[in-house]
Amino acid sequence: MRPQVVAQVAVSLDGVTSGFDVDLARFYALATLWQEDVTLAGADTILAQEVAVRAAPRPGPKPDGPLLAVVDSRARVREWETLRQLGYWSDVLALYADQTPARPPDATTRELVTGYEHVDLAEVLDVLGRRGVQTVRVDSGGALVNALLDLGLVDELALLVHPVLVGTGRRWCDTRKLTLHPVGTEVFGGGVVWLRYCVST
C-alpha cells in the first residue's frame, strides 16, 4: 500500500509561498505531529536554502529521524552530504528519472530512478510503501504539492496561513478542482492560522 501523504505548506493570506516571514519555528513544530518516515521535498525547495544549509551546524545524521527524499530530475542538488549531516534526517535519497544527467562517478548518495524525463511520483510512493514507509510529509513551496495533487496522491493538506498579503509570487495551488474536508483549525498568536483538510480524490 502507498503511504499516507501529508502536504504541509506555509502561505500568505492570498496563497503566495514566498515574500513574507514564515513562522518557521511553528511550522516545524507542527510538522512533528505526523512523525513522518519520509520528508519529501523538491529540488527548488532545497536549492532555495542552499546558502543556509552550507552555513548550518552539522551534528551528523539523526538515527531515528525520517529519510529525506528529494525530487531532482535535473540533478541540480549538490549538497547531499551536507543535508545528511544536518541532524534532521537519518539519510538522504535522490529521486531521479531515466533522463536525469549523469552523476559524478564517485557519487555515494542513494538513488531511486523512476520515470523517463520526470520522476514518476506514484511509483516513488509505491516503492516507499513496499519498503515499509507509512507516512510521507511533503515540504514544498508549491510545485511538488501541485504535481502530487494533480495525480491524486495527497491524503491530507495542512496550510499554515500568515496574516499578510503579498500580491505577487508563486501560489501554493494551481491544480484541478479539489474537494476538501476540514479536519482541524487552530489560531495562534499574531493571527497565524493552521488549517487541515482531508483531500477527496
Image: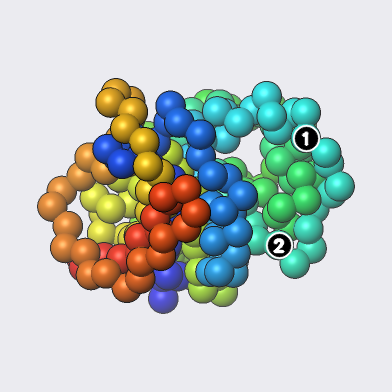
| Residue on which disc 1 sits | 56
* Label 2 Cα neighbours within 10 Å, binned few <14 / some 14-19 / many ≥20: some
Is there CB contact under 8 Å for labels 1 and 2?
Answer: no
* Label 1 Cα neighbours within 10 Å, binned few <14 / some 14-19 / many ≥20: few
SS of the residue under disc 2: loop
Q: CA distance from mark 1 to mark 2?
A: 18 Å
Q: Is residue 47 above or below residue 64?
A: above
| Quadrant occupied by the N terminus | bottom left
Which residue is at a point 53% across and 69% down the rendered structure image? Answer: 34
Q: Residue furthest front?
A: 190
Residue 69 visible in the snapshot: yes
**Residue in the foreground of this view, choosing between 84 and 170:** 170
Residue type (three-letter) at the residue carrying disc 2: Gly
Q: Position of residue 157 (x, y in %)?
A: 35, 60
Which residue is at a point 71% across and 62% down the rendered structure image? Answer: 65
Residue type (three-letter) at the residue carrying disc 1: Ala
Which residue is at a point 45% across and 70% down the rendered structure image? Answer: 3
The image quadrant of residue 67 is: bottom right
Q: Position of residue 154 (x, y in %)?
A: 33, 61
| Residue on which disc 2 sits | 65
Tell me which numbered mark, 1 or 2, is placed earlier along the sequence: 1
Total label count? 2
Q: Position of residue 128 (x, y in %)?
A: 51, 64
Q: Position of residue 18 (x, y in %)?
A: 43, 31
Residue 142 visible in the snapshot: no
**Residue in the foreground of this view, choosing between 95 and 11:** 11
Is residue 133 shown left or right of residue 138?
Answer: right
SS of the residue under disc 1: loop
| Quadrant occupied by the C terminus | bottom left
**Residue in the foreground of this view, choosing between 121 and 35:** 35
Q: How is the image coloured?
A: rainbow
**Residue in the foreground of this view, choosing between 185 and 149:** 185
